[in-house]
């Protein structure tokens, strides 16, 4: 997907019943087009609709994109989907683990079936809640089946940051990530569905807080 956009500076944007206001910049996509030859007429709205997504806020620190997050001046943001909150400002809770990069970081991913790890790989992971079900290296994807468990660690044999089971979701889609060449992947929303994740704009890190009960 590629797109044409305009940047609007000094645009008041209000969050949370007027308790927080930023003044841009705000990127507005005016026209988009598909770079996929198998779907030449696709556009950004089709991507959002087909994945049941309403929009993309874009708050990553070192993610690709036209401008920086309007929330950076507040120090950090906690994305807490289990709790239904987006909390702006420093998080003083003790995390399970903190990694460099927010949201692009170097991690280790494995695929297990019937309780046995069958394959693993070091990956450059864009921990991105907007990535729907995400992507996975093709070398790992070839071992996926319904019931396989995908686990992501800070490094090989290190701290488990998140894991999920390949299944069928409520609208009949497989939760398996899309296979891609190489080892640069997108996490998809999976790690955000099970735990709060804090993006630190000052230290350029990301903290995982472990599954919520």
Image (tube, rainbow, N blue to C red):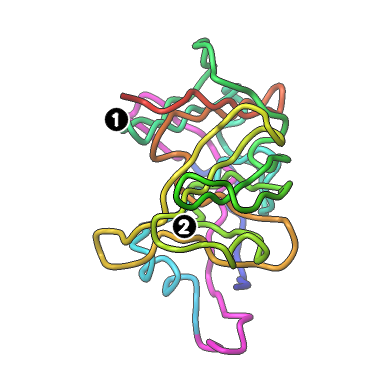
The image's mark for residue 17 is 1
Q: Is residue 23 left or right of residue 193?
A: right
Q: Residue at x 36, y 25 (%)?
A: 212
Q: As rendered, which of 70 and 153 lies closer to the eye? A: 153
Mark 2 and mark 1 in contact? Answer it, CB < 8 Å: no
**The stretch drawn in magenta includes residue 114:** no
Q: Is residue 9 above or below residue 54?
A: above
Q: Is residue 207 left or right of residue 51?
A: right
Q: Is residue 99 above or below residue 52?
A: above
Q: Residues within 10 Å of mark 2 (few under 14, many from 20)?
A: many
The image's mark for residue 133 is 2
Which label's residue is closer to the chain start, 2 or 1? 1
Q: Position of residue 19 (x, y in %)?
A: 36, 24
Q: Position of residue 59 (x, y in %)?
A: 56, 40
**How many numbered dots are placed on residues in this image?**
2
Q: Position of residue 50 (x, y in %)?
A: 37, 71
The answer to which quarter of the image holds residue 205 is top right
**The stretch drawn in magenta includes residue 38:** yes
Task: Quadrant for the C terminus, please.
Answer: top left
Q: Residue at x 64, y 48 (%)?
A: 126
The furthest residue to the left: 170
Q: Point out the stretch of residues depicted in magenta.
A: 12-41
Q: Position of residue 140 (x, y in %)?
A: 63, 60
Q: Secondary structure at mark 1?
A: loop
Task: Quadrant for the N terminus, please.
Answer: bottom right
Q: As rendered, which of 206 and 35 lies closer to the eye? A: 206
Spatial separation of the CA atoms under disc 2 and disc 1: 31 Å
Q: As rendered, which of 175 and 132 lies closer to the eye? A: 175
Q: Residues within 10 Å of mark 1 (few under 14, many from 20)?
A: few
Q: Residue at x 51, y 16 (%)?
A: 91
Q: Is residue 148 left or right of residue 71?
A: left
Q: Secondary structure at mark 2?
A: loop
């Amino acid at each position: 997907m590629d797109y044409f956009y305009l940047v609007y500076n000094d645009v008041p944007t209000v969050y949370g019943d007027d308790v927080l206001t930023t003044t841009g910049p705000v990127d507005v996509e005016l026209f988009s087009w598909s770079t996929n030859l198998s779907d030449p007429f696709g556009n950004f709205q089709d991507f959002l609709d087909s994945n049941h997504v309403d929009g993309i806020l874009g708050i990553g620190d070192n993610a690709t994109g036209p401008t920086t997050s309007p929330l950076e001046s507040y120090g950090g943001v906690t994305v807490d989907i289990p709790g239904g909150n987006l909390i702006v400002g420093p998080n003083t809770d003790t995390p399970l683990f903190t990694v460099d990069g927010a949201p692009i970081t170097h991690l280790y991913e494995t695929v297990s079936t019937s309780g046995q790890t069958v394959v693993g790989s070091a990956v450059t992971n864009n921990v991105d809640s907007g990535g729907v079900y995400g992507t996975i290296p093709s070398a790992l994807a070839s071992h996926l089946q319904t019931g396989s468990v995908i686990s992501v660690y800070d490094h090989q044999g290190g701290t488990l940051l998140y894991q999920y089971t390949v299944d069928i979701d409520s609208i009949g889609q497989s939760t398996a990530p899309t296979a891609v060449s190489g080892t640069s992947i997108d996490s998809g929303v999976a790690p955000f569905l099970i735990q709060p994740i804090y993006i630190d704009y000052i230290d350029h890190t990301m903290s995982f807080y472990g599954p919520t009960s």
